[in-house]
Image: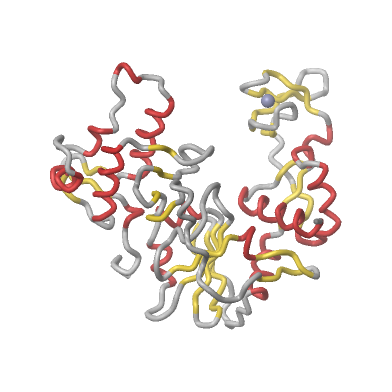
Amino acid sequence: MAAHDAWALVCRLFAGGTPVLHASLSPRELGTLPALGRAVRPAALDQRFLLCPYCQQHRAQVWGDGRGGRTCHCPECGPVSVAADDGAALALDEDWLRRKLRLALSIESRDGIDALGDGVWRLGDSRCSPVLLARDLIRLWREPALLERVRIASGTIRVVTPKPRETRGAPFGPGVEWLALEDRFTLYGGGISFLGATGAPPAPQASDPTTPVHGPFSADFRWVILPNVWPSGPIRLTEAQAAVFRSLWSFQGEPMSGERIMRRAGLKSDKPIDVFKVKARDKGKPEVERRLAAYHALVLTQQRAGLYSMPCAAAPSLAPV
Ligand SMILES: [Zn+2]
């Protein structure tokens, strides 16, 4: 379906937030460009760095090859010569996206669109609910204050973001309705149409134990989804690690002593990090190091005071406004 493919490309360009090279688009994606019309435009890309034309996995520095041509120094492929049109790029017209999303959600507030920070916008009010558009759902988990800035006493905040891998259901909990850009909208007649105007988001699917239920954590805290740490899917935790995260989560972002956290987790050691430390015999095991990286990404330590907190657990309704 052409409209579906075209919308998927819009979502991908928005999620990436930077121009992409023509060379990195699939033939199917290239085929959607006519349908996208003014939603995309040619863009200038920083020519000192390019997506490696060979593997298209790494952005690498480009050097003159001394003979009038150019070479991309890919960390994996080594030097790869760059053809003249490898630099041709296109970008999403994000103003277009925001304007059309406002129309799709019947946002008629007179005030314009507010940029709340890098990659987060307040689009306006849709039926008395503030609507946020964010490039990255994880950003809102990490900075719950962004939600607080738009919260009103009565009413749900609607949050529109591209879908991170593996996230379904209601990643934000009560008071926030999440609308996945890919699933809840589509291209229609040169604009954007909202699919399904009412209703709560579908309940998390109980059949998949990795589905995030508490922020980035699964219902039993044995899985955590952190695309910045491990883009390929959920990270499996040990039982003790799950207990520590569950305990930290229960303190709703408040700094607590290590002892109190560990007591609530039902564990003997004094510090939350103890159950994440990589033992000598596990050095180099990716799953073990991934868990430690997850700990570092989620837990704030005040070393001197011996306090630990997990900002993503701050309950939006309890955080100071
Ligand atoms: Zn490469």
Say left or right for 37 vs 130. right
**x and y percentages locating residue 66 in the rendered image:** 78, 18
Along the viewing direction, whichever of 249 and 308 lies nearer the viewer: 249
Along the viewing direction, whichever of 140 and 65 lies nearer the viewer: 140
In this rendering, the answer to whether 71 lies above or below 93 is above
Residue 48 visible: no
Say left or right for 26 vs 287. right
Indicate the quadrant containing the N terminus: top left, top right, bottom left or bottom right. bottom right
**x and y percentages locating residue 192 in the rendered image:** 71, 68
In this rendering, the answer to whether 208 lies above or below 60 is below
**x and y percentages locating residue 6 in the rendered image:** 76, 56
Q: Residue at x 50, y 75 (%)?
A: 130
**Badge count:** 0
Say left or right for 102 vs 157. right
Residue 24 visible: yes
**x and y percentages locating residue 185 in the rendered image:** 66, 65
